[in-house]
Image (tube, rainbow, N blue to C red):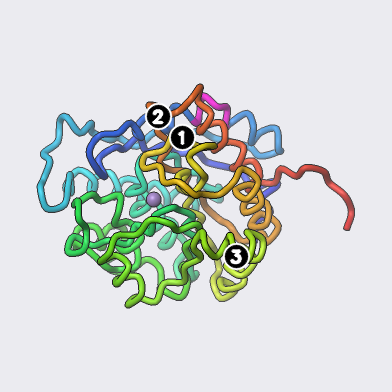
């Protein structure tokens, strides 16, 4: 496993706000860069290359299909992201993808999963939502509610087929942490698929540390783990600038602890930071929190003591 303290990092922005009606998450990459992600990672000893942004059309210029909103445009963007993700990994860099809405993960996960053939990729999906809808179960037709299902091979063939002809990851290699808002039919689909889920109730009952350790233990069979981090997992009192705020999320320390424990485990090979919405934010605080959390994941310790 690569040492997160030293591996070169490649930052790639995907300013996409097509996964639903316009909200402002297309400004997320700018806000996170403004919060000094590059300098902060360099201070930790990483060599950082900013690879720019994917080409993303604005919703005003694309056809808003009704059944699955902006399907053709999202597919085109995710295909580019998938290709770039595969390239970044094959060049030996640790990719950090800046969203954009969570639909970008259809590109990022499919790309990193096929970048090293034969390797088994796991996913830790940290999110208030399961993002496990299909066009049949979705009440809204918003693709940002579908990416986890799509990378597991469920949903619209145009989304499932991005990057790879079928599923990029297997059910047993996926875990959701922080869940607290699920649609009715989505619940049924999650249960039928057998996805491992740690809800906010589990975190309240057992504590964040036990939940995160259990999630990590359940991924011991995989070769690489992609962490897909939706800022809406954090409580909106601390992280108001997100696409779809839901009350009752992780505290500031629980979110950091999650990142610190995952860093200690040394299992993460790639990262999404998604759904930062500067329009709802206060003085860029949510983007700043995002950068702090990335620092914790990438090796920042409160203090280094021999143990
Ligand atoms: Mn999400």
Badge 1 is on which residue?
Answer: 240
Looking at the rendered structure, the secondary structure element under dot 1 is loop
Q: Quadrant of residue 189?
A: bottom left
When the figure is inspected, residue 172 is found, relative to residue 277, above or below; the finding is below
Mark 2 or 1 closer to N-term?
Answer: 1
Q: Residue at x 54, y 71 (%)?
A: 222
Please identify the quadrant where the N terminus is shown: bottom right
Please identify the quadrant where the C terminus is shown: bottom right
Magenta-colored span: 32-37
Badge 2 is on which residue?
Answer: 280
Residue 299, position as x, y percentages in the image: 70, 46
Camera-near label (2 vs 3) is 3
In the displayed orientation, state which residue is furthest to the right: 306
Marker disc for residue 93: none
Residue 218 in magenta stretch:
no
Looking at the rendered structure, the secondary structure element under dot 3 is helix
């Amino acid at each position: 496993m690569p040492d997160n303290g030293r591996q070169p990092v490649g930052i790639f922005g995907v300013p996409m706000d097509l996964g639903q009606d316009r909200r402002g998450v297309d400004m997320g990459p700018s806000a996170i860069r403004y919060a000094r992600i590059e300098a902060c990672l360099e201070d930790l000893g990483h060599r950082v290359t900013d690879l720019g942004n994917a080409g993303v059309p604005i919703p005003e210029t694309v056809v808003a299909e009704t059944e699955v909103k902006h399907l053709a445009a999202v597919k085109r963007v995710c295909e580019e992201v998938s290709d770039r993700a595969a390239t970044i990994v094959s060049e030996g860099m640790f990719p950090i993808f800046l969203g954009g809405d969570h639909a970008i993960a259809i590109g990022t996960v499919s790309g990193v999963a096929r970048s090293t053939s034969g390797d088994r990729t796991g996913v830790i999906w940290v999110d208030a939502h399961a993002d496990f809808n299909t066009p049949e179960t979705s009440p809204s037709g918003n693709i940002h509610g579908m990416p986890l299902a799509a990378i597991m091979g469920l949903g619209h063939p145009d989304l499932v087929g991005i990057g790879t002809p079928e599923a990029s990851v297997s059910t047993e290699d996926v875990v959701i942490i922080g869940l607290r808002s699920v649609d009715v039919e989505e619940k049924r689909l999650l249960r039928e698929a057998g996805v491992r889920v740690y809800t906010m109730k589990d975190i309240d009952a057992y504590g964040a540390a036990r939940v995160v350790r259990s999630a990590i233990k359940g991924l011991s069979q995989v070769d690489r783990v992609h962490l897909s981090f939706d800022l809406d997992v954090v409580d909106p009192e601390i992280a108001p600038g997100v696409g779809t705020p839901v009350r009752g999320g992780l505290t500031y320390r629980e979110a950091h602890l999650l990142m610190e424990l995952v860093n200690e485990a040394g299992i993460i090979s790639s990262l999404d930071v998604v759904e930062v919405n500067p329009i709802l934010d206060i003085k860029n605080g949510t983007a700043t929190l995002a950068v702090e959390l990335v620092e914790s994941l990438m090796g920042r310790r409160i203090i280094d003591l021999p143990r």
